[in-house]
Amino acid sequence: MKIVETIAALRNTLKNEESIAFVPTMGNLHEGHLALIKKAKKEAGFVVVSIFVNPLQFLPSEDFNQYPRSFEADCRLLHNLDVDVVFAPDEKMLFPSRQEILIRLPAVADTLEGEFRPGFFQGVATIVLKFFNIIQPDIAIFGKKDYQQLHIIRLMVQQLNFPIRILDTEIIRAADGLALSSRNQYLNGPERQEACQLFQALNNIVCRITSGQRNFLQLEQKAIEYLSGRGWLVDYVSIVNQQTLLPARTGEQQLAVLAAARIGKTRLIDNIELTVKSDID
Amino acid sequence: MKIVETIAALRNTLKNEESIAFVPTMGNLHEGHLALIKKAKKEAGFVVVSIFVNPLQFLPSEDFNQYPRSFEADCRLLHNLDVDVVFAPDEKMLFPSRQEILIRLPAVADTLEGEFRPGFFQGVATIVLKFFNIIQPDIAIFGKKDYQQLHIIRLMVQQLNFPIRILDTEIIRAADGLALSSRNQYLNGPERQEACQLFQALNNIVCRITSGQRNFLQLEQKAIEYLSGRGWLVDYVSIVNQQTLLPARTGEQQLAVLAAARIGKTRLIDNIELTVKSDID
């Protein structure tokens, strides 16, 4: 496994590869990332994993500085998975001057995560586009944990005509249901115990929809009340259409339930997809 | 020479080419375009010329509908220059749905042309980026006639890490100095005779700077008065730094004089680069 730090060296390494899969990460790898990488290994002859904590996608108030970095442990994991190249540029390499050209996204980027993290998706889309141009992969793989991000990346690839196939992987969860995330490290003991309640609340919505309830606003509201009552600060719980990420309407069948909430100082996100059988009146 | 209308067919045609030069055009080809294409032929083994009148770069008030289209004559010219592929997609091919993802440009895109054609460069950058992703050229060639456009494309390639070398060609002029442009066709007889005065005015500024004048604001103002006095409606005459396109300051050596003005209903642009010898006080 090669560890490459410069764009020139990376391009040189990749220039004769015919089938490249790319997995972008911010490091601090867990089983969720490893699922992405295993899929990459299956789908392409050559796998590039980037490790880069992208400053463009953090608000000034957010946790850019304390975001967990564990480069050597990450490299051991990637080596064990037989990854071909780890691309680990520093900020100067990706931003030799201030990034002044950015990707302008449609309204969907201002909802859900975008409402609470303004500029987040613009930062994500811009760095992903830069990586696409540096690596020129045939395939890029993103997790469903960041559901809206996956949606926006697919939209970008389609609307900007990137010749890249976007694949996804399912969320990997701890035994109690908590979705794996680098930010879970921020949780203290009691918070970690409580954290699975976010999944519980989403799962409860899914069960109620499956058993016939269709008052989505009420379901969202009850989940927010449930979590708030247990001490969470809820940003949103939202039942959306999978294709558009717009609020789901009765009769739509491909839905997803998305949530973001804070327990203590840690902000967690989670989601569940569900398919509703057509209602027979 | 192949004429290709779909993205899939184009990608299929290009997939084994090793050295591709790309020349984007809106058709209605003149000697200015041909200079781009001759350069492309010299620099790469395979030349793709696109012909597409890009709706994203026209304001609603502008001449999108009447913009001259001459596809068959264009193809004869391209055939004679031994171009390999003409890519002539229709709007549906490039915009199967409304283009909602656009390139967000820095402040330089809001000055000069951008001040008088808001959104113009965002439309140019977005279509060029789409073409870059469709064609994946090694080289792309732009004329200096659209000086600010060339600047912004270079910036985009650098800031978004496109592995594409941007080359340029000098302005091609008629015998009287008028820069060749598709829009020259809009000029009637007397307008065509008058049109070379735009170049004259720029050239006059260059002569005065060369002979030591450094009051750039006054030189700009005099050129505006000169043209206005002859019936032109002047958008701007601006002496700028070549590297930044910001207003030139005394002591800077790599300058360009840019102008846009309307004669009758036709809006023309032109520019001249100049290098100032260092002032010895």
Image: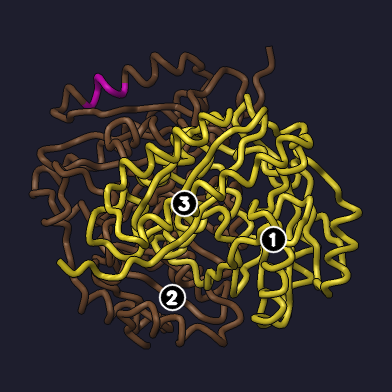
Chain colours: A yellow, B brown
Q: Magenta segment, principal secondary structure?
A: helix
Image quarter in which the N terminus of chain B is found: bottom left
Q: Residue at x 63, y 32 (%)?
A: A263
Residue annotated with mark 1: A32
Residue type pointed to by label 1: Gly
Answer few, some or many: residues within 10 Å of disc 3's Cα (few below 14, many 20 plus, some between 14 and 19).
some
Viewer-proximal residue, A131 or B61?
A131
Viewer-proximal residue, A238 or B270?
A238
Residue annotated with mark 2: B48
Residue B112 appears at what percent x and percent y? Answer: 36, 32
Residue type pointed to by label 3: Asn
Residue B41 appears at what percent x and percent y? Answer: 50, 76
Marks 3, 2: nearer the viewer: 3
Q: Residue furthest front?
A: A211
Report whether A132 appears left or right of A238.
right
Q: Which residues are magenta?
A: B223-227
Marks 1, 2: nearer the viewer: 1
Q: Residue at x 80, y 62 (%)?
A: A86
Q: Is residue A66 above or below residue B214?
A: below
Secondary structure beneath label 3: helix
Cα separation between marks 1 and 2: 43 Å
Residue B275 appears at what percent x and percent y? Answer: 58, 35
